[in-house]
Image (cartoon, helix red, strand yellow):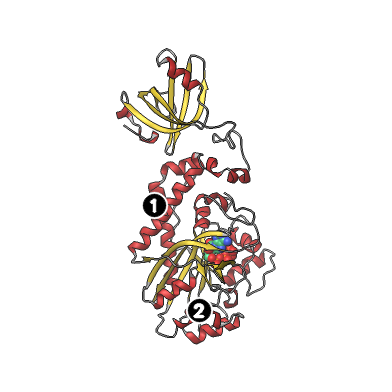
């Protein structure tokens, strides 16, 4: 019977099973050869005592090259000294594919490698259990998010990634040639998810790529990232903040439930964050940074150095709310009582921004005015603006970087660790 290494249990003792995997290690002690077989769920020790196993088989095992792909058929034997409490005495080892040597990267991690070298040889890097575990957790995170929003009545959608207008009029766009015209890769699904509010969907979820031509190379920016976006009608910014914090908390709970083994490989102990998350006003955040000697101009986005000072007091998840209207995109709703500030929020984990959201402007005239204030031409937003003329409901939403959330959950120091094949200023391959 075919098994994963992690499925082998006491009931299998004495029985014959079939394993598929890679040769992780070989130890040749002369009269005894130990192989460590690695599959996606773990390891198994394959033991070949010269006196017990077939002679040809013993010779073959000795000559195996590390990282070759093999199929092992053999008997499970209890062995207290083996790492899992059992070993396999093989009757047959089939070599499915031989690996070349030397290896471009060590899977055993006996030799540490630079991140760049690891990413250049990502398929080998991903063979390391603690690296592959990141993506097992990522799978659970996405699944938990889908379950959460499905349960709350959200409709998952996919909007176009080839677009004709900039979402926010910024310069961070990748132009592409679209037959005889110029088009862009979408930097956010913002305009489309708002359009779906006009279409009467009420609650939408999208998990998809965003593209940003950020020139700078940082530990938290990529040129292609995955964004988890929601948009909800008939609620304000507070309403969507509650979805956000509850979703994050549930993600932690489900990852703890479903990824115990993988968290162990990574060496992470997940503590479920308490909700509601603390709300810190932009004004108070500025005050904290100023008191610590940082020069902050009211009205501007908070710099990395200011955020690092604030994070000395706020290590976990918290919201920074009520941002200056001028620091946020044109579609953010200003407070009626004080239009200088807006119904906006960023979800932070320490100094890293995880998500940004707002109640949106749903009134046509105000929206056009805000576009002009920000130096944008309403003519460029034709299809979007039209939707505000024929019954656009009040609505709010947010966008959360999935890769940033992974950094936060697993304590990863570089966003590239959370992405299979990251795209940055210098990396287009693999
Ligand atoms: P930052 O200030 O950190 O550059 P932003 O405010 O420009 O982010 P938003 O436009 O608010 O980003 O996008 C929503 C979310 O998408 C961010 O909170 C972040 O989690 C994620 N995100 C944005 N840009 C990137 C990027 N270049 N790489 C990875 N994730 C990103
Ligand atoms: Mg933001």
Q: Does residue 119 appear left or right of residue 78 in this picture?
A: right
In the rendered view, would you say 229 is above or below 116? below
| Label ID, residue 333 | 2
Pointer 1 with pointer 2, Cβ within 8 A: no
Residue 91 in the figure: left or right of residue 401: left
In this view, which residue lies farthest toward the front?
180
How many neighbours does mark 1 have within 10 angstroms: few (below 14), some (14-19), or many (20 or more)?
Answer: some
Q: Which residue is mark 1?
A: 254
Residue 239 is situated, as x and y percent measured from the top left of the image, at: 42, 71
Question: Dot 1: what SS?
Answer: helix
The answer to whether one can see residue 263 in this image is yes
Which quadrant of the figure has residue 179?
A: bottom right
Look at 43% across and 51% down and name the residue there: 139
Res. 235 in view: no
Identified at 58% across, 82% down, the residue is: 377
Tell me where residue 7 sits by quadrant.
top left
Indicate which disc, 1 or 2, sits on the residue closer to the N terminus. 1
> Mark 1: is the Cβ under 8 angstroms from ligand 1?
no
Q: Residue at x 52, y 32 (%)?
A: 99
Return the residue nearer the eye: 59 or 38. 59
Which residue shows up at 58% across the image and 74% down it? 169
Q: Is mark 2 within 8 Å of ligand 1?
A: no
Q: In the orientation shown, which residue stands out farthest toward the top?
A: 51
Residue 44 at x, y percent in the picture: 42, 30
Q: Quadrant of the N terminus?
A: top left
Q: Nearer the viewer, residue 50 or 140?
A: 50
Position of 58 relative to 229 (above/below): above
């Amino acid at each position: 019977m075919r098994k994963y290494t992690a499925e082998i249990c006491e009931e299998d003792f004495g029985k014959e099973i079939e394993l598929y995997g890679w040769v992780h290690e070989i130890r040749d002690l002369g009269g005894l050869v130990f192989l460590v077989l690695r599959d996606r769920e773990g390891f198994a020790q394959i033991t070949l005592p010269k006196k017990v196993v077939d002679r040809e088989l013993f010779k073959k095992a000795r000559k195996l090259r590390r990282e070759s792909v093999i199929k092992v058929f053999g008997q499970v034997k209890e062995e207290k000294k083996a790492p899992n409490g059992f070993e396999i005495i093989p009757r047959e080892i089939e070599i499915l594919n031989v690996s070349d040597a030397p290896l471009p990267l060590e899977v055993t991690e006996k030799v540490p490698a630079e991140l760049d070298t690891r990413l250049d040889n990502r398929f080998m890097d991903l063979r390391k259990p603690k690296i592959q575990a990141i993506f097992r957790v990522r799978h659970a995170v996405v699944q938990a998010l889908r379950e959460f929003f499905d349960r709350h009545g959200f409709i998952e959608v996919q909007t176009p990634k080839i677009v004709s207008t900039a979402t926010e009029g910024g310069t961070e766009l990748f132009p592409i040639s679209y037959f005889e015209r110029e088009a862009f890769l979408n930097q956010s699904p913002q305009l489309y998810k708002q359009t779906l509010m006009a279409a009467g969907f009420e609650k939408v979820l999208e998990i998809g790529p965003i593209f940003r031509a950020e020139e700078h190379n940082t530990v938290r920016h990529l040129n292609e990232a995955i964004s988890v976006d929601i948009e909800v009608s008939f609620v304000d910014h507070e309403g969507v903040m509650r979805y956000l914090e509850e979703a994050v908390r549930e993600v932690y709970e489900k990852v703890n439930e479903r990824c115990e083994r993988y968290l162990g490989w990574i060496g992470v102990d997940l503590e479920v964050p308490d909700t509601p998350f603390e709300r810190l006003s932009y004004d108070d955040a500025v005050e904290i940074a100023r008191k610590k000697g940082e020069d902050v101009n009211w009205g501007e986005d908070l710099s990395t150095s200011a955020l690092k000072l604030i994070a000395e007091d706020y290590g976990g998840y918290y919201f920074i709310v009520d941002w200056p209207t001028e620091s946020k995109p044109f579609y953010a709703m200003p407070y009626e009582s004080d239009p200088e500030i807006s119904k906006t929020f960023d979800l932070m984990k320490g100094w890293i921004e995880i998500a940004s959201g707002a109640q949106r402007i749903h009134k046509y005239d105000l929206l056009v005015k805000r576009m002009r204030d920000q130096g944008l031409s309403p003519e460029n937003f034709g299809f979007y603006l039209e939707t505000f003329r024929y019954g656009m409901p009040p609505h709010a939403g947010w966008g959360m970087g999935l890769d940033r959330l992974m950094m936060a959950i697993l304590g990863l120091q570089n966003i590239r660790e959370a992405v299979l094949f990251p795209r940055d200023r210098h990396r287009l391959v693999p």
